[in-house]
Every structure is written in structure tokens, then in C-alpha cells.
Image (cartoon, rainbow, N blue to C red):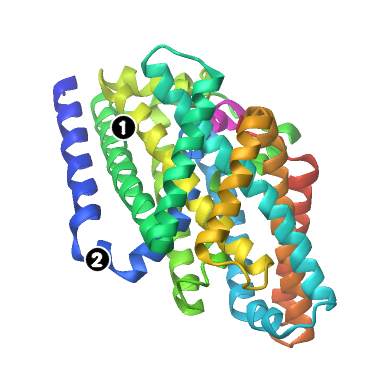
Amino acid sequence: MSDHVVIGVAIGLGLIVALTLMFARFARSESWLATVTPLASIIGSGFLICGPLLAREFGALAAPAMIALLLLAYGVGSIVRFNIAAAEPYLTEARFNDPVAWTARVAQGVLAAAYAVSVAYYLKLLAMFILRAVHSESELLANVIVTAIIAVLTALAFTGGLRRVERVADASVSLKLGLIAGMLAALALDWIRTAGPETLPPVNVSWNSVLLLLGLLITVQGFETSRYMGESYDRKTRIRTMRNAQLISSVIYVLFLVLLTPRLGQAAGTEGVAGVLDVMESVAPFLGAFVLAAAVTSQLSAAVADSIGSTGLAIELSRQRLTVATGFLLAGALAILVTWTTDSFQVIAVASRAFALFYAFQCAIAFIIGRKEGKAGPVQLTFFAVVGALCILAAAAGAPAEG
């Protein structure tokens, strides 16, 4: 099978998927729009760096390691969904000094800082990819580009609310999923023509590998944005679409790792997005362009999604005193401040731990509400406690994988 066939199939399938997601009737439905935001945040740059990292740390067990991480993320997601159904109504009626309300506010403060850093980080990476195309590495220009993007998104929020901002995420997610479909098709055809995997890297799992896997929780983070979209969608819609987003992203992550199997030995010797670029270019010329385009759209869609989550969070923290537009303005201003005053590549380590800590708080809230309101039995309460302990371990000792 020639490289031209592989490239042709990748481009063809990518176009079909992207155009279908942009123009099909279901793509304009409330259910899909509510799915897009958490899906956009989950499938960020992590999709491109997981392969090389897990190949290096887990060898032939890269795909099972990814499945274990996704099961942990799905468990955390189920706890956030429990809180949407059970804790949200309680917190709406709770007194200001209620211990559960204070726990929720502390958790939200942690998440607000994590969102500000992650939006700045995603957009800084996007700007650097753009500048790399014109052979520039100017930090000043990158910051200007980030500020301009946030300003445009804020203007959209003021003129049309979050629905107009969501359309930006929708378009970028459609293009990103098309590119990913093309990459997966190319890897599948590569498997067929190579008639099986190369020599797989040896299994060499250590405690450090486990800590790195916990650190990778940030690469499948993003489902929690549904928790803070209450201004646009009801609880049942957010619960259902968050679950859908996690399932869709899980299928993509696992497929990518499985189809990468013939190239795991090569991937183990590479790093990050540049590593995936090398692997895809070895599959067929021009596929490196798919990786770069997927990286750019991933950063944009993830940043927009986290901005939406940050806006909903700001509104909830203000006890509904902020509007959608002013909430987005505040969230955008915080991200701009982070962009101009920090090195996001270093601070992302803090964000990684902050997201894990936020999830631990969510587990604590679910445990308290479940026991206090009688909405969870002993098995479910034990589940909340175990997942919470894993999140605390990720926050305390997880090795940050991004940045």
C-alpha cells in the first residue's frame, strides 16, 4: 500500500468527519452543543503527548495504562455528575456558613486558578505553533496573540452570550475530530501494510511510572466544565452530555494507543507533540501537517472550553451576581494576567496539581452530601473515598506530564 493511498484515505475521511460535524442536523442540537464544551476540553494537547509518554514509561502496556487512566477519569466524572444531581440543589439552598458550602467555595477557588493557568497555557502553545510557521519565537508576539484571541472571545460573549462562544468551540472541535479521524485511519492502514507490530518496547513499570500516570490526569481533564454550564443547560442535559463526552474521548484515546502499537518502539524514543509528528511523518509524508493542525485546533478548542467553564464558575462564585458577559470578561482578564506575568510552561505543573485537588474536593462533597442526605449507600461512599484518595495522591505526588 503506497503512501499516496494512506494520505488520500486520511484526508478523505478527515473531510467527511469534519463536514458532517459542522453541517449535519444533529450538530446544531442542544445535546451536541452541550457535549462539545467538555469534549473540547478533554481532547486538548494531551491527546498528542500521551502516546510517546506511555510508550516510554509502560512499553507494551501503554494501551492498558491509558485504559486505567481513563477509568479513573470516568470515576471522577461520575462523582462530578453525582454532585450536579445531588450537591447543586443542596448548595443552592445552603446557608453561607454551611461547611459544605465552604468546602465548595474552596474547591472553586482552586479550580479558578487552574482554569486561568490552563487557558493561558493552551493559547500560549497555540500562539507558539503559529509563530513557528513564520520562524519566530517572540514571547512578546505570543502574548499579544493570546490577548487578541481572548479579546475576540470576550466580544462574542458580550454580543451573543456563551452560545456564540460555544460555536467557536464547535467549529474547532469539528475540525480537530476530522483531523484525528484521518490520523487514526492512517495508523490503521500502516498496521495493515506492516503486517504487525515492530519489536515492542520492554515492559518496565515502576513507582515513578505510576506517579506519571496520575500526573497525566490533566490530559483527560475537562469534563468538569459541564458542572459550571448551568446558565445554559439543565442538570439532566449536563449529566448526559458530560458522560457522552467522556465516552467519546475515551474511545479516541484508546484507539490511538492501540493503533500506535506497531510504532510504540519508535514513539518511546520521542517526546511530546514533536514526537507524534515524527511518528506520523514516518507513516507517510504530509501527515505531520495533520499533527500540527490538530495541535493548533486542540489548543483553541480546549482554551475556549475552559474559558466557558471558568465563566460559569465565576457566576456561581458571585452567587449569580455576575452576568455571562461580565463573568467571561473576568475569566479572560485573569487568563491575560497569567499570560503576561508568568511562564505558563512552568506554572502548568501547579495547574496539574490544582485540578487533581479540585477533584479530591468534589469527592469530599459527594461523600458528605451522600451520607448527610442519604443519597449514597456504603459501596458508593467507599467509592467516593477511594477515588478521593487517588486524587490526593495525584495532587501531592503525581508527576506533571504537560509542560
What is the chief secondary structure element of the magenta stretch? helix
The residue type indicated by label 2 comes to Phe
In front of the other: label 1 or label 2? 2
Q: Is residue 114 visible?
A: yes
Is 211 positioned to the left or the right of 199 in the image? right
Front one among 75 and 339: 339
Which labelled disc corresponds to residue 26?
2
Which labelled disc corresponds to residue 275?
none
Q: Residue 374: horizontal and vertical position, in percent? A: 73, 88
Is 65 positioned to the left or the right of 2 in the image? right
| Figure quadrant of residue 188 | top left
- Can you identify the residue that label 1 sits on? 187
Residue at 40% over, 53% down: 156
Q: Residue 387: horizontal and vertical position, in percent? A: 71, 60
Q: Is residue 217 visible?
A: no
Determine the secondary structure under disc 1. helix
Is 19 positioned to the left or the right of 269 in the image? left
Instruction: Specify the segment rendered in magenta.
Output: 52-59
